[in-house]
Image (cartoon, grey):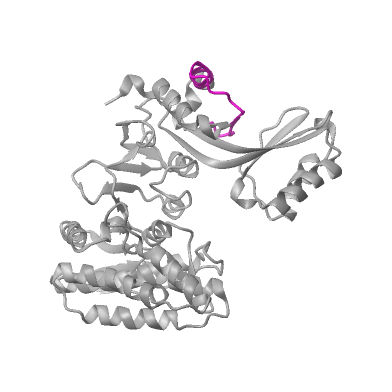
Amino acid sequence: MKVIKFGGSSLASGIQLNKVFQLVTEDSDRKIVVVSAPGKRFKEDTKVTDLLIDCAAKALLGEDTSELFEAIIARYAGIALDTGMSDAIIKQIRTDLQATISSDKSDPDKFLDRMKASGEDNNAKLIAAYFKFKGLNANYINPKDAGLFVTDEHASAQVLPESYDRLFALREREGIIVFPGFFGYTKDGEISTFSRSGSDITGAIVANGAQAELYENFTDVDAVYAVNPAIVKNPKKVLELTYREMRELSYAGFSVFHDEALIPAFHAGIPVHIKNTNNPDSCGTRVVHERENSNGPVVGIASDDGFCSIYISKYLMNREIGFGRKVLQILEDAGLNYEHMPSGIDDLTIIIRENQFGEDTERTIMTRLKEELNADQVIMQHGISLIMVVGEAMRHNVGITSRASKALSDSKVNIEMINQGSSEVSIMFGMKEEQEYAAVRALYNEFFSEVLV
């Protein structure tokens, strides 16, 4: 049995929905279909999820939501009209969405979760109705009825372990199951959403629970590429990579998957196949536990901006027991989490995402670090980009850091910091944001120029 998940761009119109139908029906093992909310139909279009967020914001302010409400309904109606369906399902969606907008607003976060989740939920109802219209034995199933229970964490829900046992019962259901992504239910019966791109997480959870042989994730790209195609023209396709490589790349900026999305599939040992709805004959990319290291030491290069660094220097820091704990306690008190913390004998650098900081938070942190640590220097630098060079085979190849550093030096890129994890699967380089693209191109040319296709 296979679990197949479709992203928003694959479900944005009637034409796209017909492609989805063809893919589902051409393989009898594709029994569970996990769906996102309708995405963009063209570059300037607006995703249904974004319309729902705007609508929720107006509702919370007590403003008129009728225009946005009709815009959302029009998206679903347009898909139904394109496929020749009756308007019965649209009447149901209209009723359900109106009930959601009119629901309790005393807890804004819970209300926003209900509104966002309705995008996937109503689309699952529409797609199940379309499949039936086309003659398939297909049924929508609500995550609560399926037993997908999660923690009560707004926009950051985590699956509860007992869900996997409950989801196994999906194997016994007749016909095709259409399952909405992005959300589950708390034990109190409240909707709670995963992080953005959470439909990928749902797909992996359902694949784990149903003990699928394969989790297929259909999107709008032919494969995972070794580097962002917006930075390097016609980059190399990656045909196979490990879960650990994919997670490292996703964390560092790859947009194909959220960095948490594959964890449930990883835990169950289920391979993931990324494919293109618009070009299903393309080989795609397989994500597996282990692979042959046949494509060189580096499998991919990812980058992301929006970081800052805090440099702390203190003579004999290495002899001061508890120094690192004090630093982390100050960050914890401010509600901050850090990304990296490379260190030396007398200094350390903390990398933090800038969107966590306000002016007051920054001022408080800097004051406490200077005064409570009695540091010689505490310097914050904004506008940092991180580049991750990733590959399982780097552990078995000498000189990767040297090659990367030389490539950056030859391209006049000033390295602000370097950090390599103990797993030796990735090397992180930090530099000023304005040098990010030049750095990525330099590294790509160093490790992939001999295998350009």
The percent position of residue 81, horizontal first and vertical second, equals: 17, 71
> The C terminus lies in which quarter of the figure?
top left
Left-right relation of 442 to 335: left
User: In the rendered structure, does residue 388 fall within the stretch colored magenta?
Assistant: no
The percent position of residue 285, horizontal first and vertical second, equals: 31, 41
State the residue at coordinates (45%, 50%).
258
Vertical arrangement, residue 387 with respect to residue 181, above or below: above
The percent position of residue 57, horizontal first and vertical second, equals: 49, 71
The percent position of residue 93, horizontal first and vertical second, equals: 31, 78
Which is more toward the observer, 269 or 188? Answer: 188
Which is more toward the observer, 29 or 49? Answer: 49
Give, as a single range, the part of the protein colored magenta: 402-425
Is residue 172 visible in the rendered structure shown here? no
Left-right relation of 11 to 427: left
> The N terminus lies in which quarter of the figure?
bottom left
Left-right relation of 246 to 373: left
Vertical arrangement, residue 3 with respect to residue 351, above or below: below
Vertical arrangement, residue 18 with respect to residue 395, above or below: below
Left-right relation of 324 to 103: right
User: In the rendered structure, does residue 423 fall within the stretch colored magenta?
Assistant: yes
